[in-house]
């Protein structure tokens, strides 16, 4: 069956590629289900019922190889169909993860018929010289298949293509808008696989495609990879050790080419069945406590080897960071590149980072992991509900360069230019307290401890984000839409006096935005709430500066 609606795609703009669904730019705002949620259709449907109450517009689900193909050649897409049906019923976009041969640098989602046949599907061999995350002394080993095995690639690719072909037939309305190929791919415990097949590949010539790509993008090559290549003579031919050296840094490049080539084979074949946007996600590295490859997954699409992935996997539309580090802003900056639109498929409950991603990096989406743990009255739920009706406006503003993100973390203020004006954003609570003290009035007491964003979850604490944050959209005619919490914005222009002309409060009721009060007097001291997300439309008046003589 062929649908009449256009297949979702990524469309390039002057500033950054955008996700286009049903012919319109859109944003994927929501979250990813826990890994096992999609394996039980009833559990999954209850989760999506809950997400609907949170105002979530996009959910990331999964299809596990072991469940899709429990017996070689026998395919079962019932859990996939259940996810499509539930997302369709709730009017949500669905992003589907293929948990194939590699999930979190292990192979626990590979079927038993794959894992039990170690002759046909050999395991990776590691020296265990680096510490490994998410394990403990005495733990049973996790299976890790070798990426250098062509039989594994053939089997994984066949199952993945069957999945995408099923989407082409069973999802004519394109509820599924993107597909993730594998999950946090790479190798832990060592900087490279030391199986016989891997050793044989290590002494081969570096593929000419990689070296040609490095030459082509040499003026914008990542600094670490450029230094590694140039430090060994910037060779245009040679073995892996001749071109990149013998250290773990060279072995990470070697593994990146292997894993990226593997994923490329799946993505290229899958897109021939249905040309959905496809991406891979990254377990970040290096990061605090994981300074070298093998401590984080060696060969995954990490900061040091992004250009290797771009060379080896051109069928992928983007490389996406899973962000659990405290410095989320730096992580976003690494993956926001002219050749790579930002999409965050996994991250913590920290709502200010969502606003920064959309406004500063023009992200196509932002997804919190374990979204079903979120409370219906959480800050994230309010953000999803408020931003949902504005996704097209935000996406269009991203394409036009009429948007800015505000996030005041360590810095007390942030300055930028938007809509032909200079803008300074500051924290409203600090400003209000200072102004009241100047007037001899006691400032308001500090806010109470923030409530948790999650309920009944076994994960780490997830307190509500108390930082000032927001989105500012330039709407034209010196009018700006501010959405956020605890933020004050001031406007200026050289040679002009700029003052507030009008502030229109905006209220969100029954799923839609309506006009509220015209704010003036004391209410202009903070035009959006201090401790919850709100919105206001600000119009300024420009007048010529008169000479004081």
Image (tube, grey):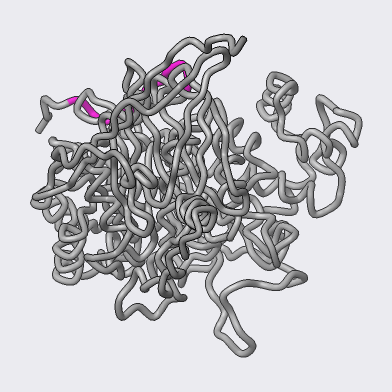
Left/right placement of residue 206 relative to residue 118 reads: right
Dividing the picture into quarters, in which one does residue 504 lie?
top left
How far across and down, in percent of the image, does residue 179 sit? 34, 44
How far across and down, in percent of the image, does residue 396 sit? 32, 24
Q: Is residue 275 visible?
A: no
Q: Is residue 279 visible?
A: yes
User: What residue appears at the point 51 percent right and 62 percent down from the top-left corner?
Assistant: 104
On screen, 264 above or below 431?
A: above
How far across and down, in percent of the image, does residue 546 sit? 53, 10
* The stretch drawn in magenta includes residue 7: yes
| Residue toward you, 524 or 118 | 524
How far across and down, in percent of the image, does residue 409 sit? 57, 53
Start and end of the magenta stretch? 6-15
Left/right placement of residue 149 relative to residue 481 reads: right
Dividing the picture into quarters, in which one does residue 52 lie?
bottom left
How many numbered markers are drawn?
A: 0
User: What residue appears at the point 24 percent right and 58 percent down from the top-left corner?
Assistant: 74
On screen, 57 above or below 24?
A: below
Report the residue that reaches farthest toward the bottom: 138
Where's the N terminus, which quadrant? top left
| Residue toward you, 359 or 23 | 359
* The stretch drawn in magenta includes residue 455: no
């Amino acid at each position: 069956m062929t649908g009449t609606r256009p297949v979702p795609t990524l469309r390039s703009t002057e500033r950054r590629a955008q996700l286009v669904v049903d012919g319109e730019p859109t944003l994927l705002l929501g979250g990813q289900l826990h890994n096992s949620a999609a394996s039980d259709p009833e559990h999954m449907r209850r989760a999506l019922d809950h997400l609907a109450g949170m105002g979530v517009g996009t959910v990331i689900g999964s299809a596990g190889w072991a469940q899709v193909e429990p017996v070689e050649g026998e395919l079962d897409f019932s859990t996939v169909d259940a996810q499509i049906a539930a997302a369709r019923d709730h009017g949500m976009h669905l992003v589907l993860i293929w948990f194939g041969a590699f999930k979190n640098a292990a192979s626990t989602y590979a079927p038993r018929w794959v894992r039990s046949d170690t002759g046909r599907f050999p395991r990776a061999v590691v020296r265990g010289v680096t510490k490994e995350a998410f394990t403990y002394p005495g733990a049973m080993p996790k299976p890790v298949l070798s990426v250098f095995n062509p039989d594994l690639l053939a089997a994984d690719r066949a199952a993945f293509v069957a999945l995408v072909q099923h989407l082409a037939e069973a999802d004519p309305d394109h509820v599924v808008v993107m597909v993730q190929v594998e999950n946090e791919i790479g190798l832990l415990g060592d900087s490279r696989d030391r199986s016989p097949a891997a050793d044989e590949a290590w002494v081969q010539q570096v593929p000419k495609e990689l070296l040609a790509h490095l030459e082509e993008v040499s003026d914008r090559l990542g600094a670490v990879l450029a230094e590694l290549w140039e430090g060994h003579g910037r060779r245009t031919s040679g073995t892996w050790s001749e071109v990149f050296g013998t250290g773990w840094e060279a072995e990470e490049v070697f593994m990146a080419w292997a894993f990226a080539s593997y994923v490329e084979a799946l993505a290229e074949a899958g897109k021939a069945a249905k040309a959905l946007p496809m991406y891979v996600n990254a377990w970040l590295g290096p990061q605090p406590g994981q300074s070298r490859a093998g401590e984080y997954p060696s060969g995954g699409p990490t900061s040091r080897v992004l250009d290797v992935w771009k060379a080896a996997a051109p069928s992928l539309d983007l490389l996406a960071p899973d962000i659990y580090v405290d410095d989320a802003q730096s992580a976003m900056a690494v993956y926001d590149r002219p050749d790579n639109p930002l999409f965050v498929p996994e991250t913590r409950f920290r709502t200010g980072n969502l606003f920064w991603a959309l406004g500063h990096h023009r992200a196509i989406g932002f997804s919190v992991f374990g979204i079903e743990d979120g409370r219906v009255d959480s800050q994230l739920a309010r953000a999803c509900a408020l931003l949902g009706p504005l996704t097209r406006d935000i996406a269009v503003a991203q394409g036009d360069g009429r948007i800015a993100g505000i996030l005041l973390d360590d810095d007390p203020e942030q300055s930028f230019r938007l809509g032909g004006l200079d803008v300074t954003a500051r924290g409203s609570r600090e400003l209000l307290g200072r102004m009241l003290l100047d007037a001899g009035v006691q400032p308001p007491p500090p806010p109470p401890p923030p409530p948790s964003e999650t309920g009944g979850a076994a994960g780490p604490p997830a307190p509500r984000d108390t930082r000032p944050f927001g989105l500012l959209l330039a709407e034209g005619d010196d009018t700006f839409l501010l959405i956020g919490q605890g933020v004050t914005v001031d406007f200026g222009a050289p040679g002009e006096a700029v003052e507030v002309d009008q502030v229109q409060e905006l209220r969100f009721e029954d799923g839609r935005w309506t006009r509220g009060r015209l704010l003036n007097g004391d209410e202009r001291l903070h035009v959006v709430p201090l401790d919850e997300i709100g919105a206001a439309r600000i119009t300024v008046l420009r007048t010529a500066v008169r000479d004081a003589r």
